[in-house]
Amino acid sequence: MKKLLFPFVALLIVLSSCGQQEKAQVGPSLVRLCAVQSVSEAEHASYPGRTRASQTSNVAFRVSGTLEKVNVKEGQAVREGQVLAVIDDRDYRVQLSAVEAEYQQTKGDCERIIGLYQDGSTTEQNYDKARYGLEQITAKYQHAKDQLADCQLKAPFNGYVQKVMHESHETVAAGMPVLTMFCSEGVEIAINLPAAEYLRAAEFDSYTASFDVLPGVVFPLRLLSIAQRANANQLFEARFLIDSRSVNAGDLKKITPGMTSIVDIRYKESGEVPVIVPAGSVFHENGQTFVFVYKSAGDNVGTVHKTPVSVLSLRSDGGMLVRQGVTQGQQIVESGVHFLTDGQTVRPNPTPSKSNVGGLL
């Protein structure tokens, strides 16, 4: 009797487990969906930056001497050619007077010899000696005049005095910076790019900057350069110039060196890189790459269909650039694709409200 009862009980257990499995499989699977994004919508990046003058110069005298007067103060606006400082020119005026007298004497002698040569009354050797002597004293005379003029230090461009390094009655050498200026007609913004973005520099399309102090105002930028060598933090410096032709002059005057900003970089649109999908939505079978495209059947259910795509690259933010197979706005399965089959009926997982953090309620 016991021998007959044991197989019967085992059969009931097997049938019961099968029924539970079939019951567990009843109903569509829950899937998380996401919309395919176009490159034009997704392809941009923002980086913090800091403004600086497009041109900065350490201004110095070309001659040595004692500072007689400094005509400007730090922060003062100056125009190109304005006299910033003057050194005592006494020695240079004396030097010019001596050279001028020598010049006049030599010039007179040379002109007489040249006249005699033209009349055939002297040799060609004397003529050459006189001509070269005149050229030599003329250059010396011009040099003395230039040195006297260099006793005045003039602004090389329109801008502002950033720092005054020496005061009156101090002795300065030629080439020693007396003050620092920065240009007022152009403002640069510098940012640091990670290596992944540096390698995509050829895809950059347009650039804009915004400032907290000027809400709602966007400044178009022009790319000046990108460093070819990374700094100690493995970042590449990119320099931009605010396009003064495309902004209000009043707003531009409010931007000064040292301000912080946000630079937005947008990338070129390309038919070869039409859309972006999450990395978790992509899977591989038999050497091909696929995603599951969701097709709604109404009443919050639908089917998923295996669709081939071509992956171009993996982005630093976890997305994948793909082409062919999917278009902007299509719904695809975001994750769990390895547990699905082609044509399977599924039910989208409802998106929790913003107040339901983590979807726990």
Image: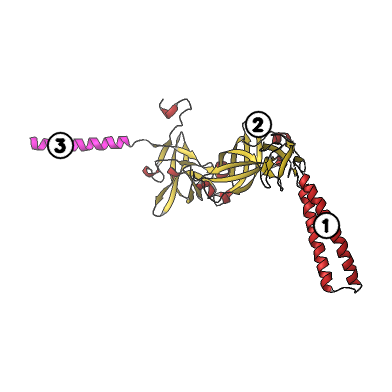
| Camera-nearest residue between 341 and 191 | 191
Please state which of the two labelled residues, at mark 2 or mark 1, is closer to the viewer.
Answer: 1
Judge whether residue 270 can be spotted in this image: no
Q: Amino acid at mark 1?
A: Glu
- Highlighted magenta segment, given as a residue range: 1-24
Which of the numbered marks, if any, corresponds to residue 261?
A: none
| Camera-nearest residue between 317 and 96 | 96
139 part of magenta stretch:
no
Please state which of the two labelled residues, at mark 2 or mark 3, is closer to the viewer.
Answer: 2
Residue behind mark 1: 102
Q: Amino acid at mark 2?
A: Leu
Cα separation, mark 2 vs mark 3, equals: 84 Å
Q: Position of residue 270 (x, y in %)?
A: 58, 50
8 part of magenta stretch:
yes
Q: Amino acid at mark 3?
A: Phe
| Camera-nearest residue between 44 and 151 | 151
Q: Could you tell whether 216 is left or right of 8 in the image? A: right
When the figure is inspected, residue 358 is found, relative to residue 202, above or below; the finding is: above
What residue sits 90% from the left and 68% below the top?
Answer: 115
Indicate the secondary structure of the residue bearing disc 1: helix
Instruction: Please tell me in which quadrant of the rendered image residue 20 appears.
Output: top left
Judge whether residue 177 can be spotted in this image: yes
Q: What crowding class fits label 2: few (fewer than 14 Cα within 10 Å), some (14-19), or many (20 or more)?
A: few
Residue behind mark 2: 214
Asked whether the residues under the numbered discs 2 and 3 touch, taking CB atoms below 8 Å apart as contact, a structural biologist would say: no
Please state which of the two labelled residues, at mark 3 or mark 1, is closer to the viewer.
Answer: 1
Q: Position of residue 134 (x, y in %)?
A: 82, 62
Magenta-highlighted stretch: main secondary structure? helix
Residue behind mark 3: 8
What residue sits 11% from the left and 35% below the top?
Answer: 5
